[in-house]
Image (cartoon, coloured by chain):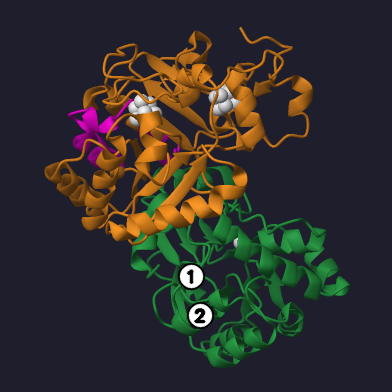
Amino acid sequence: MLDLDAPCVDLRSLDEVWFQVAGTLCNLSCNHCFISCNPGNHSFGFLDLAKIRPFLAESVKLGVKEYYFTGGEPFLNREIVPILEETLRLGPATVLTNGTVFRGRLVNELRRIAEGSQYSLEIRVSIDGPDKETNDPIRGEGSFEDAMRGVQQLAQSGFLPIITMVQTWADSDTLKVLDQFGAELKRRGCVRPRFKILPTLRIGMEATRTRGYLSEERITREMLEGYDTSQLICSHSRIVTDQGVAICPILIESPVAHMGSTLEETLRPFAVDQPACYTCYLFGSICTNTGAALSGRDC
Amino acid sequence: MSGGSTEAPVALFGGIYSNHWALRAAITDARTRGAKAFYCLGDLGAFGPHPDLVFPILRENNVQTLSGNYDDSIARGLDDCQCGYTDPRDNHFARISYQYTLQKTSPRNREWLAALPGEIRFVMAEKRVLLCHGSPRQRNEFLWESTTPDAFLLKLFRNHDADVILATHTGLKWRRRLSGGQLFANVGVLGRPENDGTTQVGYTLLRSSDEHGLEVEFVPVAYDHEQLAREMRAEGLPAEFIETIESGWWTTCLEVLPSKERSRGKW
Ligand code: SF4
Ligand code: SF4
Ligand SMILES: [Fe+2]
């Protein structure tokens, strides 16, 4: 039951469907991961093509605009190529990856399906700084080099990967960081780097790394008056997990976020009274591929 | 009634971005092709020089105009153009051209912008035609060819009671005929070249067709881009913008391009 006093966000139009395609399994264990993914976290499992198909069929009926694939690390899922291939027959797809698990054959397969579709396949690679000194303490020893190799492979095969970074520096340093990182990427053959900067979400591992949310940091009904809720991804997205459909990628660990077993069952308002909702409220569509367009998130 | 093909074509102009030279060239060209009605899908200012020059051309030629995100911002004196860029570099350039256009648009023309409708509808060859800026549901929504699924377009046709939907806003033209015969087209823009390395811009003709009722034709327009570049230089507009006019490659606001569209450009 929806609490009538809770701040509620309507689903205006189901524009994006997310797939938690790798569950919470990841080869890395970043200390800012907001759903605390790691190699041993089986709270959510892989989605295979057979599980995804009915949701794709439903999404067509509902006129969905974009598909997102996340985890954990999506490229650990052995069916990721056929899953993407089938999705790309229907619409554009974005994969959020840590970039560290590419092999030549996988990249070639991705290139083949990207070229075979009229729709764009975006690969978003998460890195946390322009050098290993900044990145590795957060994402793990050697992860910077591994990700850079991934970016290089993608660029060489003709992709234009989007590098997403959770901001770990002062606002005033943003241009400097991007310039430095752009130069480094060019040296490595990624001549047209695209960047996307995300604010830090203070839940999961991040809660222990810096600080958790203060209890008064919640969205209230008053705060939603006159607020443009289209900036919140829950007003235009839902996420499919191996345990049903949830409100958004950020909250999948919270039982209240699970809304039904089909997309159709989740086409109703949601009470945005969770601590992480407050960050969405402050930063807007934190997870978009592009500013005015639609959603995504750090992998 | 049969033989809708006797109806005269109508001309559709996308974003003008203050390119008064291209607008004049397009109107002349459309006349020679028999167009009897002219429509502009919004974004009169931005990018180019002397925003006030575009208004008399639209009025004198009776161009039916709707309001784009830029027009809405200029009319209301908002802080930005509502393109929603997040890249710091894109934002920098967007701000320069927005401030320039806001300062150089006369109060009378800003009032004229404020009175423009958000959409225009008409019936042609028995088809319900809907003209809008970004999409029928949101003025600043980008509808790119590689990120707009058929199923999503069908939803727009269903929700907005139309057989033909025409939009602009992205700067890149494309069209798609859906299985039910509905036609969507992005009419492109007159304001800047198409990120294809040529200096020409383009507009769209909507004409009757025996097979589908209506079809679109994309018409390239060559204009005096060197003169435009000179005016932009004299006005102190960013070198990056002038480079786009002279080279045909986009140099800014690239972050919104999906990968397929971005790959075709140079930057
Ligand atoms: S942030 Fe991404 S790469 Fe890091 S542990 Fe979480 S899912 Fe894995
Ligand atoms: S975390 Fe953000 S997207 Fe998720 S329900 Fe809360 S406000 Fe909506
Ligand atoms: Fe626009």
Residue that extends furthest to the top in the rendered view of this protein: A1
At 21% from the left edge and 46% from the top edge, which residue is drawn? A110
Q: Nearer the viewer, residue A241 or A138?
A: A138
Q: Which chain is orange?
A: A
Residue B61 at x, y percent in the picture: 71, 84
**Residue assigned mark 1:** B251
Residue B226 at x, y percent in the picture: 55, 92
**Compared to A95, does B129 lie above or below?**
below
Quadrant containing the C terminus of chain B is: bottom left
Q: Chain for mark 1?
A: B
Q: Quadrant of residue A164?
A: top left
Residue A140 at x, y percent in the picture: 32, 29
Q: Is mark 2 on a helix, strand or loop?
A: helix
Q: Chain for mark 2?
A: B
Residue that extends furthest to the left in the rendered view of this protein: A105
Can residue B211 be seen by looking at this rendering? yes
Disc number for residue B243:
2
Chain B colour as displayed: green
Q: What element carries label 1?
A: loop
The span from disc 1 to disc 2 (Cα, nearest Å) is 8 Å
Residue A64 at x, y percent in the picture: 44, 38
Can residue A10 be seen by looking at this rendering? no
- Residue A220 in magenta? no
**Compared to B29, does B242 lie above or below?**
above
- Residue A82 in magenta? yes
Q: Magenta region: which residues? A: A61-87
